[in-house]
Every structure is written in structure tokens, then in C-alpha cells.
Amino acid sequence: MPSASLNERAVLNVTGEDAEDFLQNLITTDLDTLERGDLKPGALLNPQGKILFEFLVSRNGDGLRLDALRTSTGDFLKRLTLYKLRAKVQIVVDSEMLVHVSWEEDSKPSETESIVHDRRFPDALNVRRHYGGAQGPGGNGMAWTALRIAHGVAEAPNDYGLGDAFPHDINLDQTGGVSFRKGCFVGQEVVSRMQHRGTARRRILIASGPSDLPETGTPITANNREIGTLGSVAGKTGLALVRIDRVKDATDNGMPIMAGETAIHLAIPAEHRFTFPEATQEA
């Protein structure tokens, strides 16, 4: 059973009589469809529809657990508190909570353990998020990165910058992280318009090359024109946030796509449902 410690993550616990209604009206995830024992991605957006904070949400007793980037939890707490007003909600950062992940385990977890199923991945992988307990082994961080890459699962800050991406950019619409049925949430109007008009131009794709890819943050170019940025890297594969219309244009015209000095191939993650545009905007 591979596993990895996630020291870059921390937990916010949201409890109280109004906890679920409070979050349901703010975040992109539909909590009505969140089953106990499951974990889903989500985001809190600004009014312009861009991601201010990304997290993984799961049920924790009578409340909700938000698994977020450790460096952003202080600002995340402040932002949630601004929306709290008179709601009967308590929001507490548990910076001491240990977080680790495991996958490819045959046995089912005990119902008494704080272990949840990460629904961003195929069920067959049995990816589990573990909260509390003993610290898991930390030597498989690269294996975890490689697993995320193989399934197109992006995370800040390596794959995109907070405040600089829409949910569609990082494929939240593909992984259950944004709902278009539940009603209002912050930034919902912009995100729904992108969905219904099909105007998402940037996407996370899987990059692969004949040799080890360059470092995270390397520009991706086609015909000497920047079309995106390389994110997480594990050997010869990585994630790339790119303009898919320009990827299509380069592919149709036989132009090489480069990450620095390395020629790469870009592909849509196998589990995702979006496609390359039929025609480029230039056409």
C-alpha cells in the first residue's frame, strides 16, 4: 500500500447549527451530494469567479472538514469569518492535524477511523485521505505526485496560482468540485456562464516527454508563442495549465509544443469529459 505524508496541508473544522447551510451558500461543491466517508474537491471564489482558496471537503462528526493548503489557512479563516455574520457557526484551524494519503489498499477502513475516500480518483485506486493518528511514512511524495499527474488532479500552488484561475481551468467541473445545479455560491454567475457558453479556454492537461521534464513553472510554447505553464513534474510526465485552443492549433499545423527545450505531448486526462475545440479562435 503506497502512502505519503502531506505536511503542506492543514485542516479547518466548520461546526455549529448552521455549518452546512453556511458553506453551501459560499463554496462551489454541492454538499447535498457529499456522502459520509467521501471527500470532494471545492473552492471559494471571488465575485469574478476566480479561485481564492482550494480545499477538499468531507464530513467530520456533525460538522465539515476543509483540508486546505497550510500556507493559506489563516487567510481562508479570515475570509470565511467575513461571511459568517450572525450564522451559528464555529470555524477552527487545526494546524496540528496530521494528514496523509494512501492508495491501492485492498482492505476497507474501520468505521471508527477518520479515513475518507478521495473521489477525484477512480474507485479502483482506492485513494484514501487519513486524518489524525500516527504520522504516515513520508517517503512516497513523488509517487503521490505521479498519481495526481496520471489522473489530471491539479493542486495549488504548483499547478496554478490562487487568485489566477477559474474552476474550469483546473478541471473542477470534471472532478465533482463545482455544481451547476445547487444554486448560488460566490462567483457562481461567471462560472455558470463559462459552462453554458463553453468558453473555458484554459485547462489542465497531462504533459509527457522523451526525457525528464524541466522544473515546475517552465513556460510552454508553440511556434515561439507562450501557451501555458508546466506544473507538477514527476520524471517524464507532468501537469500543464495551457490554452487548449492554441494546443489544438499547434497540433493541427504540425508545430512542436515545447516545455523549455523539451518537446512534449499534451493529452486530456482519461477520466475527463471535455474535448479540444473543433476550430481555433484564430480560425
Image: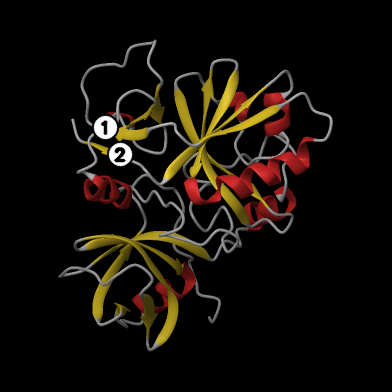
Tell me, yes or no, whether the two marked residues, 2 and 1, touch with CB atoms within 8 Å: yes
Which numbered circle lies on residue 136? 1
* Callout 1 secondary element: loop
The single residue placed furthest to the front in the displayed view is: 96
| Residue type highlighted by circle 2 | Ser
Seen in the picture, residue 28 relative to 91 is either above or below; the reply is below
Q: Name the residue rendered at 31%, 16% in the picture.
A: 109
Left or right: 90 in relation to 202: right
Give the colour scheme of this rendering.
Answer: secondary structure
Q: Nearer the viewer, residue 274 or 213?
A: 213
Left or right: 48 in relation to 74: right
Which numbered circle lies on residue 5? 2
Q: Name the residue rendered at 44%, 31% in the picture.
A: 97
| Residue type highlighted by circle 1 | Gly
Crowding at label 2, few (<14), some or many (≥20) Cα neighbours within 10 Å? many
The single residue placed furthest to the bottom in the displayed view is: 224
Residue 136 image offset from top left, x and y in percent: 26, 32
Residues at marks 2 and 1, CA–CA distance in whole angstroms: 6 Å
Q: Nearer the viewer, residue 58 or 90?
A: 90
The single residue placed furthest to the right in the displayed view is: 86
Mark earlier in primary sequence (2, 1): 2
Q: Nearer the viewer, residue 156 or 147?
A: 156
Residue 95 image offset from top left, x and y in percent: 49, 37
The single residue placed furthest to the left in the displayed view is: 211
